[in-house]
Amino acid sequence: MEESTDIECKSKRQILIATDGSETANEAADFALEMFGCSGAKVYALYIIDTTPYRSVSLDKIWSKETLDEFERAGYEATSYVEKIGKAAGVEVESRVLKGHPTEKILSFAEDNNIDMIIVGSLGKGGYERVLLGSVSKKVVRHAQIPVLVVRERHKSEKKIDTGIIQLQA
């Protein structure tokens, strides 16, 4: 008995890269664009200003306009990295900076925008650090209704080290 192996191709995929501007998030963006850059997918770069500790109090009572502006600047700086590497790869990238609970905002953005895959970085924290800090990537994986790709931080020994020394070839 022969099974059908027809794969239905969706015309244009939409990928969400959630970033916090960290080196690990940038590594996840690099990996995502290496993997999907030639696919013609549209990429959304999403940064969330975490307002979780302040749910019951209005932000304008806690943070000054300057503080909130600084968080927004950090968000646009983080998403601009994804835009830069996307442009170099010839990929359409749209950036968004939102306020709220990171996991909830990532998941609702994905649902509202018909995202096909979420890509996040992970520091790979373990033990008490994970319990104490929680993990956005872990919560996204647990609650997402679509595929999630978690890109782990490379081990320090695997990272390129720029010593500033120029090596000459004979």
Image (cartoon, rainbow, N blue to C red):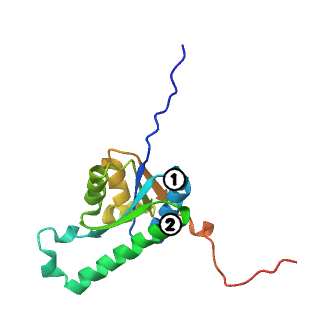
**What amino acid type is highlighted by mark number 2?**
Lys
- Left or right, 120 with respect to 33, comes to left
> Which residue is rendered at x = 27% and y = 59% of the image?
105
Residue 153 percent across, percent down from the top left: 50, 63
- Identify residue type, mark 1: Phe
Task: Give the side of residue 100 with respect to residue 20, left or right.
Answer: left
Measuring from the top left, give residue 166's x and y in whole percent.
74, 83
Kind of element beneath mark 1: helix
- Nearest to the observer: residue 152 or residue 91: 91
Tag of residue 87: 2
User: Position of 36 compared to 47: left or right?
Assistant: right
**Residue 134 appears at what percent x and percent y?**
32, 62
Q: Look at the image and tell me whether residue 21 can be seen.
A: no
Tell me which residue sits at (32%, 54%) in the image.
Answer: 139
- Residue hosting label 1: 36
Mark whose residue sits in front, 2 or 1: 2
Q: Quadrant of the C terminus?
A: bottom right
Q: Which residue is most to the right?
A: 170
Badges 2 and 1: C-beta atoms under 8 Å apart?
no
